[in-house]
Image: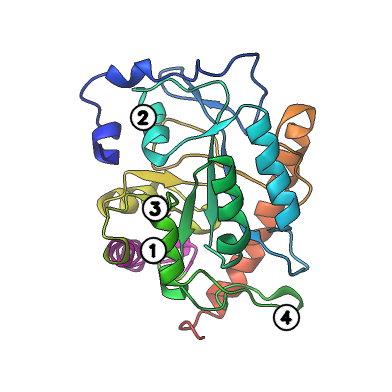
Amino acid sequence: MTFRDVLIPQSRADDAHSGARHNGAPKKAGASAHSAAGRPVPPVLVYHKVECRNEFGVTRLSPRRFAGQIEALAVGGWRTLTLNELAAVLAGTRAAGPREVAITFDDAYRGLRDYAFPALADAGFTAACAVITEYAGRLNRWDVAIGGRRFAHLAWRDIARWHGRGIEFISHTATHPRLSWLEADQAALELTRSRTMLEMVLGAPVQAIAYPYGAAGPRERELARAAGYRLGFAVLSRWRGDVLAVPRTPVYPWSTSPPVAGPWGVLERSAAQIVTRGSFVGAMWRHAHSASPRT
């Protein structure tokens, strides 16, 4: 079954797949939303770097902290959703389980292969990883180097290997621009080039996009839809029933275990809002100093 089958449902047969397999009262996790039909939408988390190297930014988690969060989710009875399962929940053809979560990674940094993906595999979890296709195997020269440190992205061989082990890979555009600042034809090219390259490497359809900086206005969503995407991820937006603008909650170093759960969840999301607004400055720097990828 493809995203298209799920998001343009033919029946409601998948309603039988509920999260009733988990007993006990569910914990609250993530920015819970509701589908247009009133069904609960599971939390969708987004990570960035999982690295041993320190940096001055706030998007890096240490491998130990990440592993602790994943262990807390597993011990708490949570299970991760595949993209098809999440799409079915959003379409109303599948009920959301009380302890189901979707895990995503933006930027596809190399540290994921060494620390994050193995931790997920040990827990029996899956995830979706958004790739900046023209920077695969390169340093993150598209970003501001706070403190002068650069980080490498996953190489294509790493992407192919972990795709074969159950990690799903999706588009994060070709060069990570803020799409809302581009002309429509340029934004469309970013979307199509990335999808084409990923499909060529993976040998499988790629029908999901994570918008750089979470910039997913009406125009960007329509461009994504025209480019063939059937699922789109934003950041800290509100769920309004559009599967091309699925809200996600970022996980930062101060996040609890399990992340964005319990009484501190509101404070965590408020802090994440501040950081997300701060990324606007980085996007401005990137836009002013845009250049071709370098090794």
Q: Earlier in the sequence, mark 1 or mark 2?
A: 2
Secondary structure at badge 2 equals helix
The residue that mark 1 highlights is 160
- The furthest residue to the left: 10
Residue 184 seen in render? no
What are the residue bounds of the magenta stretch?
A: 176-199
Q: Amino acid at mark 4?
A: Gly
Of labels 1 and 4, the one closer to you:
1
The residue that mark 3 highlights is 220
- Estimate the x, y position of residue 72 in percent, counting from the top left: 70, 36
Q: Are marks 4 and 2 in contact (CB under 8 Å)?
A: no
Of labels 3 and 4, the one closer to you:
4
Measure the alpha-carbon separation of dots 3 and 4. 32 Å
Q: Main secondary structure of the magenta part?
A: helix
Q: Residue at x 48, y 67 (%)?
A: 177
Q: Earlier in the sequence, mark 4 or mark 2?
A: 2
The residue that mark 2 highlights is 88
For this rendering, which residue is in front, 293 or 199? 199
Q: In the picture, which quadrant includes the N terminus?
A: top left
The residue that mark 4 highlights is 148
